[in-house]
Image (tube, rainbow, N blue to C red):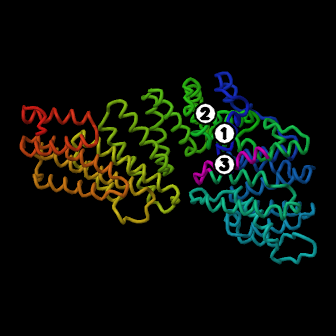
Amino acid sequence: MTSGAASLPAAAGEPGGTGLPDLDRLRAALRPAELPLPSPRDAREAAGRVNDLLHAERYGEARVLVEQFRDAPAAAEDRFALLRAALHGAALSRAGEQVARDAVDLVTLLRRSGNAGQAAAVVAVLLERGPFAQAASSRTRAAIEKIPTGKGRRRGQVPQATPEMLVVVRALERSAVPGPRGTAADPRRDAARLRAALAALPAVREQLLVDPEQELRLRLAQVLEGAGENAAATTAALDVLDLIAERAVALAVDVDARDPRTDPERLATAAHAVLARTLGVERPLQAVHHALEALDAMPGIEDPPLRIGLITALLQALMAAGATRQATFTAGRLASLQRTLRRDALRIAPLLAVAAQRVRAERYDAARGSLEQARTLAREARDRHALLEVARLAASIHERSGEHAASLHELRRMAHQARWLADDLATPTSAQGELIRTELQANALVMRRALDLGRSGAVEEATTAIERRTRPGGGRPVLPAELLWDHRVDARVGRFLATGDALTRGEAGVEEETCERRRREAQDAIDERPPGHEDRARYWSAYLEDRHAHLLAERGATAPALEAARRARAAWVRLGSEEDVTRLDALLRSLTGEGTGEG
């Protein structure tokens, strides 16, 4: 079986078109919500609006709307959607009494609809340790424990539900209400819970008031994306869209995402949003069209975080697709729209996307403004991932502008943030490898830039950090041994070059013996090559001998420089590097004044 982007047909998977959108199409997609939105006409529309308000963290307005429609006549499925949204809002706002009241109404509805097993499972999940229990006081818990879930139930008796029903309901409610802000999420554990629920669903599907498969698969797609498993997340999101289409055919109805009545949980919009993000690198054109498909539903949805998140994904996909005009237009709209977000932490990602587009467009001054805003907000939110990206973009700007000292400063920041994140206990093992790779690359760039600037202290700091991360026996490796070895050799050679430069400048405390010791240390590291990497080791040995010859020549040590230059030339000849051989010939002529010195 194929998964992820590979599961899409070669010329399909692009809703609404197969080419880049023109500016008129973008202008229509990026228009703001049509405020004020018309008032909901019934409980189903109200449920959708409540979900939008909860996602936008406007809990008070959501509660007002719930109370307006709480007792309105409605089909059981529509009333269930409204009361469930109300319960989620009460848990998110930590309103214990409202949790109890909404739980009573929800369980009563399920019991009267003949879904006693689901009612018992809801009560059991509410009493478990988690987001609902955290919002409930002891008085609230006592009230929940007394909710009758079926005929003949004695007051105070702990409700019972089948294991399969508990697995399904637990996955639904835990995934719908995240933990308190600041707590660490575990997407892999959440994914396991959702997969278990999908496996248990066939056994209890007929006992549930509403079939939850679409929602479960959407939550699975979202947590897989959070775990960095983009291919699996893409497959799950495509499954959601297929299920929605199949249900529409089975019911002989036209599912229009722009009609709030058809999708109160915004499942289709959210699935397109996942695809806009997960396909952004591998299939950017398809990501663009999924983002536009989701944005088409937004005029009737008042949810700025969702809207701006979609536009951020759209901008990133447009950049990946090389659509310069469209990306420039989108970045301008996003720079303006991100100011409408109520929570500053949500502004960081769009600001970084805008900055990245302006760097690519070589509008460095404009990019600096967005970056500094993002840096300030990331520091306040203690968002180290964002600080890492800020440092990376800032270093790129300084390099392109020829500001090498400033670039060195940002590269050191980048290495520091990557190291902190890689060593953080909250970082999943699956993410550690890429963070360590980023740290090593940043420190390697620090070393090179510091060598160029003659900053021996910065060279020593960077090489020490690389040695610490790549030392043999330094713990369970999360990167290939050959990559760690290559970085370790690079650091040892860099330390030798820094020592040689310091000796040439006559720095205090640096002697010939120090330089020779550094050279031997570099050669020892080269000799520790992993099996199968002899060619790379020969390259490093030739390079080390080459640089040794040049350093000796700069210090006026002609005889040893000649010996090292001849060894280096022979090594380059064996490697077939004509350009390096020509360069060594020039060095030999300058040292001897006679031919190449081959004899």
Mark 3 or 2, closer to the camera: 3
Q: Secondary structure at mark 2?
A: helix
Marks 3 and 2, how far apart in space? 35 Å
Question: Above or below — where is 546 with respect to 475?
Answer: above
> Where's residue 133, x and y in %?
70, 67
Q: Are marks 1 and 2 in contact (CB under 8 Å)?
A: yes
Q: Nearer the viewer, residue 367 or 536?
A: 536
Does the segment drawn in magenta span residue 229?
yes
Residue 383 spot, x, y in % from top left:
50, 50
Residue at 32 percent across and 45 percent down: it is 446
Q: Is residue 383 left or right of residue 396?
A: right
Q: Earlier in the sequence, mark 1 or mark 2?
A: 1
Residue type, label 1: Pro
Question: Between residues 5 and 251, which one lies in front from this camera angle?
Answer: 5
Secondary structure, mark 3, is: loop
Q: Which mark is residue 304?
A: 1
Magenta-highlighted residues: 225-242
Q: Is residue 198 visible?
A: yes
Quarter of the image where one finds residue 410:
top left
Q: Is residue 574 left or right of residue 78?
A: left
What residue is pinned by disc 3? 3
Three-letter residue code for mark 2: Leu
Tag in front: 1 or 3 = 3
Quadrant of the image occupied by residue 547: top left
Q: Are marks 3 and 2 in contact (CB under 8 Å)?
A: no
**Magenta part mainly helix, strand or loop?**
helix
Mark toward the start of the polypeptide (1 vs 3): 3
Residue tagged 2: 337
Sequence-first tag of 3 and 2: 3
| Marker count (numbered) | 3
Q: For the residues marked 1 and 3, what is the alpha-carbon distance in whole angstroms?
A: 31 Å
